[in-house]
Amino acid sequence: MESIDKRKQLKERFFWVSITMGLLCLVLFLSLTPNLIAQNSSNDSKKALEKFTEIYYYIQQYYVDEEKTEVNALIDGALKGMFKALDDPFSAYLTPEELHYLTDTSQGSFGGVGLVISKKRPATENQGERTENTPVEVISPIEGTPAYKAGVTAGDLIIKVDGESTYELSLDEVVRRLRGKPGTDVSMTLQRGNSLVFDVTVTRAVIEIPTVKSAVMPQGIGYLKIIEFTSYTVDRVKEVLLDFKKQNYKGLIVDLRSNPGGLLPSVVSVSDFFLSQGPIVSVKARAASDNVVYNATPYKTIVPENIPVVVLIDRGSASAAEILAGALQDTGRALIIGETSYGKGTVQHAKVMGDSGFRLTVAKYYTPKGISIDKVGVKPDVEVKEEEYSEAEKTSYEKLIKENTITNFVKAHPHANEKAIDDFITTLKKQGIALRELALKRLIKNEMNRTNNNPPVYDVSIDPVLEKAVAIILER
């Protein structure tokens, strides 16, 4: 009986020793696996770099045109190719010349036409079409700049610059061609809609990035247009909001249409004027150090909770503008009306390396509800879109553009009153122009505003989205 108990104890001991050894082996395997994976990854990188070095030296030694094998030229080309492989229009290697352009922009002024552009995204993700085989799309014209005054609008496609196709050019290459010495001309071939293609010549100027415009409407509603989020925007918006408060405003309209974005700290601070608690935006990246949540602080709030807020957006609202719209929408602080925004929800780092550098997408940002708007955009609570043109209207529109009918009228009557505009519209109708009256009036007034040195801050008569916003506030 005693021997049976001993054998039983030995079996149990062997069983638990086996289990323990098994667990130790499992722990050891799991601890070594990351190192093995890292080692394999390191080996793969080492082999790839050896392959690159071998090809690089072979080109230097044997390529037929020796002048093309200069060290910096080959390395710059290789680095450009590496960034192009990411298929991200916002990531790029920057040559010394391109880095100079980037520095000009960050300083707040540069010589150019005043367009915020991007490579147009492929229609579908599964077509295999890459962004370098697409034209350049206008995200928005900067208000008051030469391109804005020339009538370039959000959604236009730039298919040529000075006769050169943009399909095979990188985004930075197109930017470099559009910028230049103030007073010089650049020609663009634009496509608007599916069929209208026309040329426009724009004279470059010093582009100073603007901030805000404001006015108190007759109904006691504060109108705040944020043109772009720069280092000056926060102070300017604060001044405007405090001024509205002195005038006992009853509601607030924040116009973010054609706002291409700007600085993240700027939009976070502006959002803080509306929100007293909770997250404004969160940034999520592969690197833990880049993961940040920006929260509202109670003592910075300027707009009282009893003031109704409506935010206007369109397809030209991007990046930082979408952060503000998304924050105010998710928290229920504002009603968003207009069209779905552009959908740029990524964060870029720019780094300088010697006389060159690069720009790399490192993170995405998320609204307070954890929603990423990248390639999707902010969807309005109330959609207000311009009605689609009929085929007859498209034909009439193309005729007006190609014959410069509106431009010529405004040149002859730069300060036309409402009666003169209505009479001109009547004449156009008699000539067979099929566009509806509102569309014609908008074309005429927009052209007048572009050529006027002191255009009105807003014009409800040609702005159905603003008209709807006013009606919503008055109903509350």
Image (cartoon, rainbow, N blue to C red):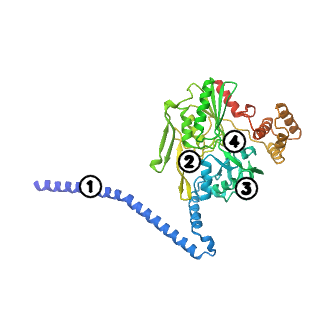
Hey, what amino acid is under mark 2? Thr
Does residue 396 lie above or below 351 as drawn? above
Seen at 62% across and 58% down, the residue is 97
Does residue 460 lie above or below 291 as drawn? above
- Compared across the picture, whether 407 is left or right of 53 comes to right
User: Does label 3 or label 4 sit earlier along the sequence?
Assistant: 4
Q: Which residue is mark 3?
A: 160
Hey, what amino acid is under mark 1? Ile
* In front: label 2 or label 4: 4
Q: Which residue is mark 2?
A: 346
Q: Nearer the viewer, residue 69 or 338?
A: 69
Q: Which residue is mark 4?
A: 143
Q: Residue furthest top?
A: 248
User: Does label 1 or label 2 sit earlier along the sequence?
Assistant: 1
* In front: label 1 or label 2: 2
Give the class, few, some or many, for how many residues have Cα within 10 Å of label 3's Cα (few <14, many ≥20).
some
What is the spatial separation of the Cα atoms under label 2 and label 4, in whole angstroms? 24 Å
User: Does label 3 or label 1 sit earlier along the sequence?
Assistant: 1
What is the spatial separation of the Cα atoms under label 1 and label 2, in whole angstroms? 49 Å
Q: Nearer the viewer, residue 56 or 182?
A: 182
* In front: label 4 or label 1: 4
Q: Secondary structure at mark 3?
A: strand
Hey, what amino acid is under mark 4? Glu
Q: Which residue is mark 1?
A: 19
Tell me, yes or no, if residue 194 can be seen here. Answer: no
Q: In x, y percent, where is residue 345?
A: 57, 45
